[in-house]
């Protein structure tokens, strides 16, 4: 019997995931849109109940690409964007690609110093922004290389577009939709070296310093979109062009940026939620459009657990931050759906892993799923079934499938109760298995590679990544940020189970050293998430003022809403003493009304560390003053 190439190779066969997708097309990223516009003509983007088909989107893209070229922008020039999750982002993104330019996606919520740093480094010649962010845009323009400003309002793509516009009050400042409407499509045709020509200059979140610009090529983005398509196996390909997906995450973030391309490649109807914090808006669009899939981050799924989503039966895809198992349990209990966790980082375009075991559980286990994957792989079967689903339409398919998912979620819940382990049942707390063609190396604390046998035996190490989705390097030098073997160092400490599923133990930057002992903050976070009164828990380490070279553990807790009794610091410490090592018990527990979140709704541990350090310093100063 042939031994598997990797620990997860058997899972590929179960789910119907190919070992490789090579050769990847030598096409620029905008080819994704053109292919979809031809194949899925009636599907497209939905924004506040206004729909723009992919065919219409392609026409808008060609016109805007023509505008950008006539402004004097040349191949390789950068264009910055300050846009929310919206049709406008799609138009700008694909038009920038079509014109041979490079996008710098940016957030209006970023600190001014970060925006200034991005634009100083990336030297964009043009900026496309929403009118709500005009003050930010004009302030940035004064101290940057930006020559042209294109402005749009969210209602430019709506059922009631504006009939008049205010004067922008400056030279080289234009309303984007007016330029599109009066410019015939004549976009430039360039030859592309897809492995070297940049599509996006995507800056990291800057959680440990100033953001770094990840140079993502057309090959990187296109390859990662294809990897996403195949990561859900044969069943995922079956529903291409036949369902709707809810996008409630920022497209300027690496996760959102890739998802928009992947979902376009899938041909799904994409339902835009302009504000990622708008839970009520999400619920309304879910009820109106019956999406089968929701893409989001853990905090969004947490908030939906308290919304009117009874029996929605959706399939959630979570990324950007660790997904607490209790959030999965609550979401399943309320919505009768499930959440699959993914993993990635900006340097990898960004997605590299997905946990698809919820689908394995839903469809009866490994043997039935293997048979289903084999059946769908028979030539001619999948195209015929896909055609039938597309004829039914996304709303009908979404309604019927979510009803089926609701039923199967309840029926299979007996095999996924906490503490019960059985092969083929959904795994939680894991980021899943790697995408096809994703190369992985695990190294110990000294940087020495570990064998898969050593990792399978329980040895933990840092995960290094490479593959067709790996960046060209940090701006502006190819190879910068990549080791001599071509790998990205993730700073994530991982372990593997017997089937090759990866578990993030902690980030090396978040690991806390207490008197020489290693405290994995992720493990404490997971314990806090299991406390019945904790909505969000976060663990950080700060310098110990009494022991040089050591740290103390500080825990922040946001209580669940509508608790009958308040959570106290003493209660949390007692809870952790029963479950964690003595050296991992926090010296401080701080209860907050609301956990600070980043613009992509991740817990802001950088800010929490600063808050903890400031509080400890005040306490020390007070003690000194009293002596």
Image: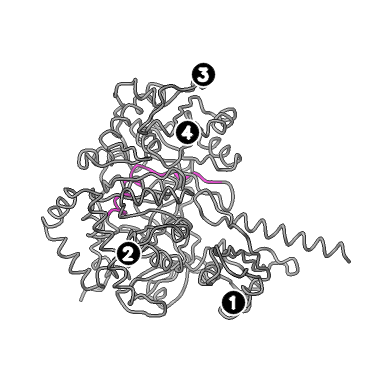
Q: Which residues are magenta?
A: 211-229
Classify residue 413 by image quadrant. Answer: bottom left
Q: Nearer the viewer, residue 295 or 199?
A: 295
Few, some or many C-alpha atoms within 10 Å of disc 2 (few <14, some 14-19, many ≥20)? many
Q: Nearer the N terminus, badge 4 or badge 1?
A: 4
Q: Dot 1: within a 10 Å radius of its alpha carbon, few (fewer than 14), some, or many (20 or more) residues?
A: some
Residue at horizontal 12 percent and vertical 60 percent from the top? 378
Q: Residue at x 36, y 59 (%)?
A: 439
Depth check: 159 or 102 in front?
A: 159
- N-terminal label among 1 and 2: 2
What residue would you read off at disc 3?
Answer: 171
Read off the residue under disc 1: 575
**Left or right: 574, with 301 as reference point:** right
Q: Residue at x 32, y 74 (%)?
A: 425
Distance in Å between CA atoms under marks 2 and 4:
37 Å
Alpha carbon separation for disc pair 3 and 4: 18 Å
Q: Looking at the picture, does residue 471 appear above or below residue 74?
A: below
Seen in the picture, residue 476 relative to 338 is either above or below; the reply is: above
Find the distance from the CA under tag 3 to the CA under tag 1: 62 Å
Viewer-proximal residue among 456 and 535 = 535
Is the C-beta separation of discs 2 and 4 under 8 Å? no
Q: Say whether disc 2 or disc 3 marks the residue closer to the N-terminus.
A: 3
Quadrant of residue 449 in the image?
Answer: bottom left
> Label for residue 130?
4
Q: Which residue is mark 2?
A: 356
Q: Furthest-right residue in view?
A: 627
| Numbered disc total | 4
> What residue sits 52% from the left and 34% below the top?
133
């Amino acid at each position: 019997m042939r031994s598997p190439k990797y620990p997860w190779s058997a899972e590929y066969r179960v789910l119907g995931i190919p070992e490789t997708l090579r050769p990847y097309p030598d096409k620029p990223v905008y080819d994704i849109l053109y292919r979809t516009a031809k194949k899925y003509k009636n599907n497209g983007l939905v924004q506040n109940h206004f729909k723009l088909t992919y065919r219409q989107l392609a026409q808008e893209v060609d016109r805007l690409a023509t505008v950008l070229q006539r402004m004097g922008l040349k191949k390789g020039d950068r264009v910055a964007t300050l846009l929310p999750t919206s049709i406008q982002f799609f138009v700008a993104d694909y038009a920038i690609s079509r014109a041979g330019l490079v996008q710098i996606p940016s957030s209006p919520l970023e600190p001014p110093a970060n925006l200034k740093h991005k634009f100083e480094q990336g030297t964009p010649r043009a900026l496309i922004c929403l009118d709500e962010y005009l003050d930010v845009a004009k302030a940035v323009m004064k101290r940057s290389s930006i020559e042209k400003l294109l402005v749009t309002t969210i209602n430019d793509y709506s059922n009631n577009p504006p009939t008049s516009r205010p004067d922008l009050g400056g030279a080289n400042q234009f309303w984007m939709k007016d330029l599109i409407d009066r410019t015939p499509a004549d976009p430039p045709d360039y030859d592309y070296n897809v492995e070297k020509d940049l599509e996006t200059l995507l800056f990291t979140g800057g959680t440990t310093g100033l953001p770094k610009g990840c140079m993502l090529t057309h090959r990187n983005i296109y390859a990662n979109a294809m990897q996403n398509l195949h990561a859900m196996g044969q069943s995922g390909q079956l529903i291409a062009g036949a369902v709707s997906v809810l996008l409630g995450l920022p497209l300027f973030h690496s996760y959102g940026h890739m998802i928009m391309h992947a979902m376009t490649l899938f041909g799904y109807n994409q339902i835009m939620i302009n504000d990622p914090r708008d839970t009520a808006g999400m619920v309304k669009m879910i009820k109106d459009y019956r999406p089968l899939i929701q893409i989001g981050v853990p905090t969004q799924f947490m908030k939906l657990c308290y919304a009117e989503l009874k029996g929605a039966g959706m399939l959630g895809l979570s990324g950007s931050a660790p997904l607490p198992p209790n959030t999965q349990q609550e979401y399943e209990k309320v919505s009768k759906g499930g959440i699959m966790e993914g993993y990635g980082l900006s340097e990898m375009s960004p997605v590299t892993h997905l946990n698809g075991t919820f689908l394995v559980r839903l469809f009866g286990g490994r043997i039935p799923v293997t048979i289903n994957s084999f059946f769908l792989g028979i030539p001619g079967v999948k195209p015929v079934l896909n055609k039938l689903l597309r004829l039914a339409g996304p709303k009908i398919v979404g309604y019927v499938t979510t009803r089926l998912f609701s039923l199967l979620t309840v029926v299979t819940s007996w095999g996924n109760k906490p503490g019960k382990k059985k092969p083929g049942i959904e795994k939680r707390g894991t980021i899943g298995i790697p995408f096809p063609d994703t190369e992985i190396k695990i190294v110990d604390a000294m940087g020495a590679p570990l064998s898969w046998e050593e990792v399978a035996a329980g040895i933990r190490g840092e995960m290094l990544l490479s593959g067709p989705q790996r960046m060209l390097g940090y701006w502006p030098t190819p190879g910068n940020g990549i080791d001599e073997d071509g790998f990205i160092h993730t700073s994530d400490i991982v372990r593997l189970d017997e089937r090759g599923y990866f578990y993030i133990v902690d980030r090396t930057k978040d690991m806390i050293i207490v008197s020489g002992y290693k405290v994995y903050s992720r493990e404490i976070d997971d314990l806090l998430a299991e406390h019945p009164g904790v909505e969000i828990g976060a663990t950080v380490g700060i310098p110990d003022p009494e022991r040089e070279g050591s740290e103390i553990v500080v825990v922040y807790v946001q209580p669940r809403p509508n608790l009958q009794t308040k959570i106290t610091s003493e209660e949390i410490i007692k809870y952790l003493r029963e479950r964690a090592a003595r050296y991992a018990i926090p010296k401080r527990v701080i209860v907050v009304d609301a956990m600070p979140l980043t613009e992509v709704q991740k817990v802001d541990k950088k800010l929490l560390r600063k808050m903890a350090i400031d509080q400890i310093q005040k306490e020390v100063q007070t003690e000194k003053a009293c002596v």
